[in-house]
Amino acid sequence: MQAKPIQSPGSAAAARPKPKRELLAYLKTNYDMYLLLIPGLLFALVFNYLPMYGITLAFKDFNMFAGNNPFTSLLASPWVGLEHFENVFGRADFKQALANTLLISVYKLVFLFPLPILLAILLNELRVAWFKKVLQTVLYLPHFLSWAVVSGIFVTLLGSTGIVNQFLDAATGHTISFLMDKSIFRSVLVATDGWKDIGWSSIIYLAAITGIDQEQYEAATVDGASKLQKIVYITLPGIAPTILLLLILKVGHILDAGFEQIFIMYNPTVYEVADIIGTYVYRMGLGQMNFSLGTAVGLFNSVVAFVLIVSANSLAKRFMKKSIW
C-alpha cells in the first residue's frame, strides 16, 4: 500500500487557490450574467433610490419658492428636526386614520388571506379540464379591471337605487345604505377587494400545488387516504413555504389598506371609518400643499411596514424554522 504524502501547512496554503484569483475566474466565467443585471440595477437606482432624497422633506419646513426649482427649494428650506412628526402624532384626524388603516388591513388579512388558498385547493381537485379552465378565467377576470370600473359596478349594484336595494325594497320594504352607512362600509371594502383579487391570488398557490411530487398522492391513494387526508397531510404542508412567504409580505403591507380602492369608493359620510393613512397623506400633501407633513406621515408608514416585515420574518424563522431570508 502506497503511503499518502504528507504536506506541510505551508505547502497546503500555497496549493490552495487565492480568493482574488478565484473571484477573477468566477467573474470571467459569469460576466454575461452580471451585464444583464446592470439595467435592473440602474432602474432601481434611478427610480427607487435617488427619489429617497425627498425623505428630507419630512425634516424641513419646505418652501417651494425658496429656490428656482423643487430641488434648489428643498436645499434652501430650513431644517426643523422632528417638528412635523410631533405635529402629526398629536392630531386627532391622524390617529383616526391610523386606527382605520389597521382595522381595514386586519379585516382583509383575516377574511381574505385564507380564501385564495382554499380556492386553489378546490380548483386543483377539479377533474373536468374544460370546466376548470372556464372557472379559472372567470375568477381571474376581475383582477384586470381598474378600481374605477369595479367601483362603478358596485355603485350600480349597491347604490340607493341599485339592483340589490330594489330587490330588498320589493321583498322587505326596507333598503340598506351600503356605501353611506358607517357600520357597513368597511365590510363593503373587504368584500369588493376579495371579489377583485381572490382569483388572481390563487395562481401562486396553484403553481405551488403543481410543484408537489405526485408520487406522494399516488402512495397516499394506495394506502387508502381520503381526499381530505391528502389535502391536510400532503397539499397544505407542500405549499406551507409559499403561504408563509405571502403572509410575511401581507404583514409588511398592513399599513397599506388599499389607497386606490378607498379613494375611489369612499365619500364624506364615511370619512370617519374609511379615511386611511394613504388618503390622509394625499389630502395633507397634495390637497393642502403641506408636503413636509405628508412626507412625515409617509415615512412613518414606511418605517412601520419595514419593522413589521422584519419582525414577521424573524418570528417565522424562530417558530417555524422557515423564512424569506
Image: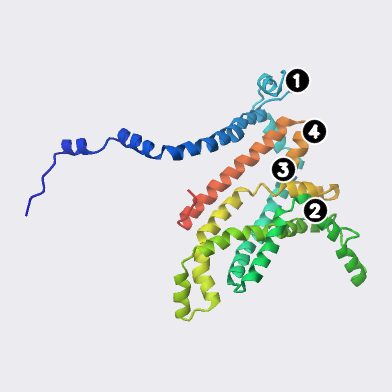
Mark 3–mark 4 distance (CA, rounded to whole Å):
15 Å
Do callouts 3 and 1 mark residues in contact (Cβ within 8 Å)? no
Mark 2–mark 3 distance (CA, rounded to whole Å):
18 Å
Mark 3–mark 1 distance (CA, rounded to whole Å):
26 Å
Q: Vertical placement of 274 versus 132: above or below?
A: above
Pointer 1 residue: 65
Mark 1 or mark 3, which is nearer the start of the sequence?
Answer: 1
Mark 2–mark 4 distance (CA, rounded to whole Å):
26 Å
Pointer 3 residue: 278
Mark 2, other Cα within 10 Å: few <14 / some 14–19 / many ≥20: some
Mark 3, other Cα within 10 Å: few <14 / some 14–19 / many ≥20: many
Q: Residue furthest left?
A: 1
Residue 30 badge = none
Q: Residue at x 54, y 38 (%)?
A: 40
At label 4, the amino acid type is Gln
Do callouts 2 and 3 mark residues in contact (Cβ within 8 Å)? no
Pointer 4 residue: 288
Mark 3 or mark 2, which is nearer the start of the sequence?
Answer: 2
Q: In this view, does 268 lie to the left or right of 125?
A: right
Q: Which residue is drawn at 67% across and 38% down?
A: 298
Q: Residue at x 60, y 65 (%)?
A: 120
At label 2, the amino acid type is Ser
Pointer 2 residue: 151
